[in-house]
Amino acid sequence: MKNQSAARQRSPFTKAMLTIVGIALFLGFMTLGTWQVQRRAWKLDLIERVDQRVHSAPVAAPDQSLWPKINAANYEYLPVQAQGVWLDRQSVLTKALTEDGAGFWVMTPLQRDDGSQILVNRGFTPEKMRASWLKQISEAGPSTETVTVIGLMRMSEPGGGFLRKNDAANGQWFSRDVAAIAQAQGLSNAAPYFIDLGVPASNPAFAQSQQSPMFDAVLKSGMTVIKFPNSHLVYALTWYGLAAMVLGAAWLVRKHDKASAGR
């Protein structure tokens, strides 16, 4: 019986390895949980800042001197206004899925006096209107009327979307990739961001931001979805729960070893 009890006891090396693994797992899970708590605090702060931002009065769209400093944290969803002339012929349609169903965003460059261009999301058009829009864009003449655009700043969406890559050669756009669209449409000095036409109804410039539909076709603007997924609390509780399980497992192992040593 004594020999069997000794055989059931773990060797010092095995105990040391289990201890090291247990400590590493516990510290790792605690670190991940704490990181998620910090991420949650950052996300809540971001949500509050953006909520305040979208209700603020529009400011001038950033000019070329500010382009290198533009980032999502400080500029995404900022209400801005810009003046220029529409480059209707260089519009593109990018795939969209909205509360109104599937369709396209009509993206039109705005030519500014300083020689730069800003891509503007003029609004949503249904899937069935694609052929009609492409025809109207191809037949559009040069515009000379200066317009004022008011909307929300958005960051470029490089690569593609809907599990598909953008295909500039065939005019297939699945995301609002500013750099790729600018290159395909011959825009030599395009801003690194685009503007979603329209601001929330609670913004003081809401009425002023409403525009006449392009080419007399139906366009629905002001459909920007401002939503930030925030599951960090769930993730934090998961990691902390795993850390607690490691402690529980360590307690059971220690209890088993004591019981084995007493036999």
Image: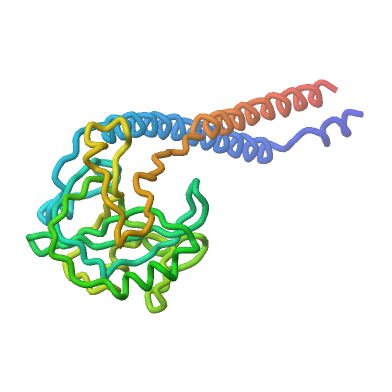
Residue farthest along the bottom direction in this orientation: 169
Judge by depth and name the residue closer to the eye, 164 or 214: 214
Residue plotted at (30% across, 52% down): 155
Residue 89 x, y percent position in the rendering? 26, 71
Q: Position of residue 174 (x, y in %)?
A: 44, 63
Residue extending farthest to the right is 1
Which residue shows up at 72% across the image and 38% down it?
Answer: 11
Residue 207 x, y percent position in the rendering: 25, 37
Q: Position of residue 222 (x, y in %)?
A: 35, 44
Q: Is residue 251 above or below residue 31?
A: above
Q: Residue at x 26, y 55 (%)?
A: 193
Number of numbered discs: 0
Relative vertical location of residue 177 with respect to residue 248 in this rendering, above or below? below
The residue positioned 32% from the left and 34% from the top of the image is 201
25 on left or right of 75? right
| Residue lying furthest left | 114
Vertical comparison of 89 with 216: above or below: below
Front-lying residue, 179 or 143: 143
User: Closest to the observer: 4 or 60?
Assistant: 60
Quarter holding the C terminus? top right
Q: Quadrant of residue 178?
A: bottom left
Can you tell which quarter of the image residue 243 is in?
top right
Instruction: Please name the colour scheme applied to the rendered image.
Output: rainbow
Q: Is residue 191 above or below residue 20?
A: below
Q: Quadrant of residue 1?
A: top right
